[in-house]
Each structure stands twice: as C-alpha cells, then as structure tokens.
C-alpha cells in the first residue's frame, strides 16, 4: 500500500468515527417523558385500581432526541383482553393523529380510555405505546389494572332495551318492551324499580325489583304500553329508567314511530273492552318458558269479569295463564295477564295460536305467532352423576363406620371401668 492510499484510508476511517451511528439513534427518535393517568403520574409497570365504567384520562408527554426531527409519530393506548373489543373498540382504544416533533422538543397529548362496565372483574393490562415512521422500535409502557365493581351510583345498568315486535306502532295498538338490567357493583341491591314511559303521551308502566344480587341479570319481557287511538303520527321518545338505593338512577332512551291505522275499520270508536298484546313471542324449545303479556282494559262504567283461553298450542306445547285465566277489572282500570308458553323439545319454526278474552258473552280474539327456536343440546352428565353417587355412598359408609367405632370404644371404656371397680372391691383394707 503506497502512501497516498494510506492517507485516503485514514481519512475515511476518521470520518466514519466522527459520524454518529444512525441505527443507535433510530431506537430513541421519540420516547415518553411523563405519563399522567387521572392527574396522577404513572410509571411504567405501576398497578392501577379502577372501577367498571370508569374513564381513564391519559396525558402523555413525549420528547424527541437532540439529533433528529421526528415525522409521522403516533401514540396509542388500549386495554388488552376485553372480549367485546371488536364491537366496542372505540371504548377501550384511543390514539392520537400523526404528528411531527422537531429535534429536542417535548409535546403533550390527551387520550381517553373507558373501562367497560361489563368487563370481567379480573386483572387486565393498560398499554401505551409511541413510535414514528422510522424508528425500528416501539416504546411501550404497561400498567396492571385491578378491576373492581362499578361505583355505587353506577352499579345497576340497563344492558338491553328492545321494542317488540318492531319500533313502528299503529295508533290503538300496543308495544312490548323487553328490558334487561344487571348489577355490576360489589354488593346486593334491593328495592329497585324499573319504569318505561313515553313522556309526550303521558304513558308509563312500572315494575319493582325486590333484590338484584351482585352480578345478577334480570329480564323483563312483559312491559306493555298501548298507544291511544287518535295519537298524532310521528316519532316519540321512550325512556327506560331504573331507580335504586333511594337516590340513584340510570336511564336509556329509544324512539318509537306511531303511524295511522291502515283502514277505516281500525280507526273505529274504542269498545268497552280493549285487549292488546304483542304480535309474536320467541320461545326456546325443550322446556324453557316464555312470557306473553296480555293487557285487558275495562273502558266501561262497571267492573267486568274476563275469562281468557288459548287455542292451537296443544299441538306443539303447553300454555298456562298467570295469575289465572279469570280476572276482574274495575271500570277505567287495566290488568295484565301473562300467558306462559312452553314448546316441546322437537318443535321448531313459527307456530300460530289464538287467544280469546270473553266477558258477558262478548269475545275478543286475536292471533299471534310463537317463533320456536331449536332446543340446545345439553352435555350429558351421567359420568358426573355416577361419581357423585359413589362419593355419597362412600360418605354414608364412612359415617356408619365412625359411629360403630365410637360405640365400640364407649363399650370398651365402660367395661374397663367396671373391671377396675371390681378389682378395687377385692383389695383388702389396711388401717
């Protein structure tokens, strides 16, 4: 190697030594400076105690290094492990828009995560990550979430509120409202009430909830409201509200559309007896009972006795009325009778049945449809029953053996005491 080549090689090596390695800098183009969750500084790996339904306000402060400008960076936060994430991704995931950050600068970003009210009470992870379009690594912070029951003022939630059979109702007919409520708190709650109302029409129906245990779900499928004849067609807000713990409440709303009757016959003057019920009911075959509510209104001036009957059910299931098929309704009052329907195990499809409401020789009849779903196959538990029976008999035998052993020991102890007494009598007295 000649002198000129040595000089060039030396200069190249010197330049390489002076230029900072790009890969080493790439790894920390951008990083977290500080993260606050609900106004408290949270370090990577911290444990956070949160409640179902709680909102986590996240402020992430990020900084770029002193050498490179950051381009198209993004921060993302999410709760890992929520089973309904595909339907409610916006609740458990939040992220910033893409942003640039000049070298040596710091910037704050706000995000929000909602702890789902129906998430399991278990440990979960909150993860917060930051990266840009060029960094080969992602800086990730992990937080352990200890999830507790909802706060007391949000313990009861309405899970489902459905108008059946559809949300469009003719004036003069009734709508059935199916409501499911659940206690997401850490204790049992008593003396709750459920109320469904249409404020604009001054209509409401009420149900009481004697007790709702921790985690329990209750379903209400028999809430009927009849839209008065002559109601102006249009959209009306329906409210479902649960009141509990004297001062707490939760509410959801929906909309029903009232339309004019289809014919002149449907718009005839109201009769003394008005009977309203849903058009259909869903039933699971194989013994599960479904409730079909029937609202009987006495619009006359005297009390009336009504006798109810169901035809066309015995070919595919059974039908019973609760509290009974005879009901007395005072003038201007109404009562709801519940038709309890059960479908045979091998029954499926739509089944038509007829309900008759008789009073003083007059009969009100209507037809409804039972949508029967196939029975679900239950796993056999014959093996478990056999094991349980064997264990029960083994326990009985063990108890008998212990009793016999106890009697033997008592008998032997009694004999031993008697023999000892006889020995004492045989001994001579010494004075």
Image (cartoon, rainbow, N blue to C red):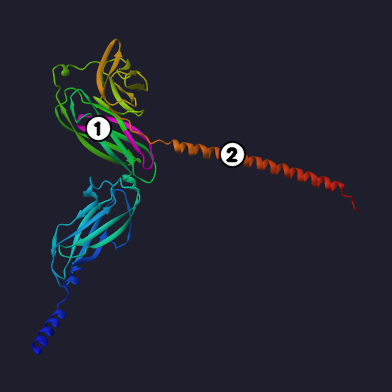
Q: Is residue 408 left or right of residue 106?
A: right
The local crowd at label 1, few if under 14, some if 14 to 19, many if 20 or more residues have their Cα within 10 Å, is some
Residue at the limit of the structure toward the top, as seen here: 361
Residue at the limit of the structure toward the left, as seen here: 4
Residue 206 within the magenta-colored segment of the rendering: yes
Residue extent of the magenta highlight = 198-219
Residue at the limit of the structure toward the right, as seen here: 431
The local crowd at label 2, few if under 14, some if 14 to 19, many if 20 or more residues have their Cα within 10 Å, is few
Residue at the limit of the structure toward the front, as seen here: 1
Q: Which residue does the numbered mark 1 point to in the structure image?
A: 197
Q: Which residue does the numbered mark 2 point to in the structure image?
A: 397
201 and 310: which is toward the camera: 310
Residue 280 image position (x, y, % from top left): 25, 25
Pointer 2 or 1: first along the chain? 1
Q: Secondary structure at mark 1?
A: strand
Residue 314 image position (x, y, % from top left): 33, 19
Rendered residue at 14%/24% (across/down): 260
In the picture, residue 198 is in which quadrant? top left
In the picture, residue 155 is in which quadrant? top left
Taking 339 as reference, is 153 above or below it?
below
Residue 74 within the magenta-colored segment of the rendering: no
Q: Main secondary structure of the magenta part?
A: strand
């Amino acid at each position: 190697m000649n002198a000129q080549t040595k000089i060039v090689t030396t200069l190249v090596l010197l330049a390489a030594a002076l230029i900072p390695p790009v890969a080493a800098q790439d790894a920390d183009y951008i990083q977290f400076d500080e993260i606050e969750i609900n106004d408290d500084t949270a370090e990577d790996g911290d444990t956070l105690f949160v409640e179902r339904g709680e909102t986590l306000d996240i402020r992430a402060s990020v900084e770029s290094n002193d050498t490179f400008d950051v381009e198209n960076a993004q921060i993302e936060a999410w709760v890992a492990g929520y089973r309904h994430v595909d339907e409610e991704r916006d609740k458990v995931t939040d992220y910033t828009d893409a942003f640039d950050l000049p070298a040596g600068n710091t910037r704050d970003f706000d995000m929000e995560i909602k702890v789902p009210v129906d998430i399991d009470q278990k440990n979960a992870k909150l993860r917060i990550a930051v990266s840009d379009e060029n960094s080969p690594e992602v800086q990730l912070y992990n937080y352990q979430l200890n999830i507790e029951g909802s706060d007391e003022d949000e313990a009861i939630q309405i899970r489902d509120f459905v108008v059946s059979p559809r949300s469009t109702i003719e004036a003069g007919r009734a709508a059935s409202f199916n409501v499911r409520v659940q206690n997401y708190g850490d204790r049992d709650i008593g003396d709750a009430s459920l109320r469904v109302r249409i404020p604009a029409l001054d209509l409401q129906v009420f149900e009481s909830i004697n007790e709702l245990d921790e985690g329990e779900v209750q379903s209400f499928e028999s809430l009927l409201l009849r839209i008065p004849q002559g109601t102006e067609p249009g959209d009306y807000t329906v409210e479902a509200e649960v009141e509990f713990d004297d001062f707490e409440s939760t509410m959801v709303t929906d909309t029903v559309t009232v339309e004019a009757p289809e014919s002149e016959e449907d718009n005839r003057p109201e009769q003394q007896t008005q009977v309203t019920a849903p058009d259909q009911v869903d039933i699971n075959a194989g013994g599960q009972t479904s409730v079909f509510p029937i609202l009987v209104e006495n619009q006359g001036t005297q009390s009336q006795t009504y006798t109810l009957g169901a035809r066309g059910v015995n070919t595919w299931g059974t039908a019973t009325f609760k509290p009974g098929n005879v009901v007395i309704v005072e003038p201007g009052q109404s009562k709801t009778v519940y038709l309890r329907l059960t479908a045979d195990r091998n029954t499926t499809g739509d089944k038509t049945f007829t309900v008759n409401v008789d009073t003083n020789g007059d009969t009100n009849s209507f037809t409804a449809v039972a949508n029967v779903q196939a029975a679900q196959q239950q796993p056999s538990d014959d093996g478990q029953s056999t094991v349980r029976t064997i264990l029960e008999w083994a326990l009985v035998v063990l108890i008998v053996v212990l009793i016999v052993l106890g009697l033997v020991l008592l008998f032997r102890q009694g004999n031993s005491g008697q023999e000892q007494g006889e020995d004492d009598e045989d001994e001579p007295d010494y004075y």
